[in-house]
Amino acid sequence: MSERFVEAAVRLAGFAGLWFGWSPDSFWRATPAELAALAQAIGGDAGAAPPDAGTLARLMEAFPDG
């Protein structure tokens, strides 16, 4: 992985604050399902389907981990 969990969590917490008006405490108390529901409400169905095995293989080849 090119991004560590902490870096991703900080970035996501910032987005939650901007998009949803959440405080850091609200972000850390939220479940992944709650966060996903709000993100889907903003983004609609775009990107709702997970990538298939072929897409994952191409991405892994194009962006290998260190």
Image: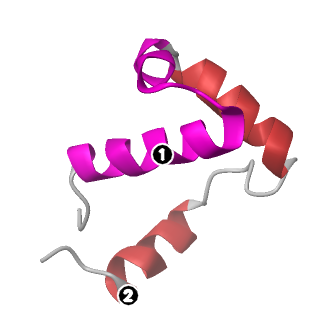
The residue lying at 81 percent from left, 57 percent from top is 46
User: Which sits in the foreground, 31 or 65?
Assistant: 31
Give the dominant element type of the magenta stretch: helix, strand or loop.
Answer: helix
Query: Which residue is labeled 1 in the image?
Result: 14
Element at label 1: helix
Q: Where residue 38 sits: x, y (%)?
A: 73, 31
* Residue type of the residue flagged with mark 1: Gly
**Camera-side residue: 18 or 41?**
18
Q: Is residue 50 above or below residue 2?
A: above
- Looking at the picture, which amino acid does disc 2 mark? Ala
Range of the magenta residues?
5-29
Residue labelled with disc 2: 62
Q: Position of residue 61 (x, y in %)?
A: 34, 83
**Residue at the left extreme, as displayed:** 66
In the image, farthest residue toward the bottom: 62
Q: Which mark is residue 35?
A: none
Distance from disc 2 to disc 1, alpha carbons, whole Å, reads 28 Å
Reply yes or no: does residue 6 show up in magenta: yes
Q: Position of residue 60 (x, y in %)?
A: 35, 75
Q: What secondary structure is marked by label 2?
A: helix
Q: How is the image coloured?
A: secondary structure
Magenta span includes 58: no
Quadrant location, the N terminus: bottom left
